[in-house]
Image (tube, helix red, strand yellow):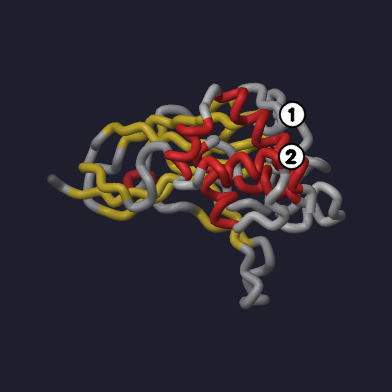
Amino acid sequence: MSSYNLGLFLKDLIQQQGICISELSRKTALSRECIYKLLRGDVQQPELSTIIRLARALHTHPLLLLRKLFDSWEFRNAAQLPAGRSGDAVGFLGDVTCPDNSIVSVNAKFTKVWEIQNTGQQAWKRRRLICVDGQLDLHMKSDRSIGKNSTFQSPAQQRGLIPAQPELAIPHTCPGESIRLSVDFTAPPFPCSTISYWKMVDENGVFCFPKHEGLSCLVQVVAL
């Protein structure tokens, strides 16, 4: 394990974000002594809970910290789902607004915000996030009569969320950078549970991460 590389990476993150050790200690519930040991590379096998706490406090993905810890190993991308381009990877940091099963009223207008991170080695250039609610590909492996890649039409529009736009541009994002993406929605006119799916495409409209589920907005619509 390369605890020294992890320490250097943590130092860079701390410097970039202008956070002091005392503040980092408060946010992570880790002692100052523990943090200094991590920065020096004196902790050979930090606990996973420690990595997660640091990642949350420093607004980064735990995968990036783990990669630094295992820099000298040969399975750095083993846990990644296949991407359209070699060295491309994405990490989901969280729902900034409207987490799954949030309650909204009928016909309500609201904004969904996701935060993701470029965890690969390729910069994201001229990419877009598009709504894929109109047509979903289901892999029906259990039913040979249907076929492996059958097409499933999404529910009628009146039962789904209505986005203000079907796509949005993704800003240029370098490896290690995180971004927030937001979409304005209008809820359907009657109570229901509904979801909207979004996926990243390149400048040619090709899915960047075809095997990934993508981003979603799941809400419970109620009549108040």
106 above or below 170?
below
Q: Quadrant of the N terminus?
A: bottom right
Q: Residue furthest left?
A: 224
Q: Please tell me in which quadrant of the rendered image residue 143 appears.
A: bottom right
Q: Quadrant of the C terminus?
A: top left
202 above or below 48?
above
Callout 2 crowding tier (Cα within 10 Å): few <14, some 14–19, many ≥20: many
In the picture, the disc for residue 120 is 2
Do the CB atoms of the residues marked 1 and 2 lie less than 8 Å apart?
no
Q: Report the side of 42 relative to 117 (left or right).
A: right
Say what amino acid the circle numbered 1 marks.
Answer: Ala
- Residue 180 percent location from the top left of the image: 51, 30
Residue at position x 52%, y 47% from top? 53
Residue at position x 40%, y 28% from top? 164
Name the residue tied to disc 1. Answer: 123
Q: Please tell me in which quadrant of the rendered image residue 149 appears.
A: bottom right
Viewer-side residue, 70 vs 132: 70
- Residue 83 percent location from the top left of the image: 75, 47
Q: Residue furthest front?
A: 33
Viewer-side residue, 85 vs 74: 74
Residue at position x 28%, y 32% from top? 109
- Is residue 93 visible in the rendered image? The answer is no
Residue at position x 47%, y 33% from top? 22
Q: Secondary structure at mark 2?
A: loop
Viewer-side residue, 27 vs 110: 27
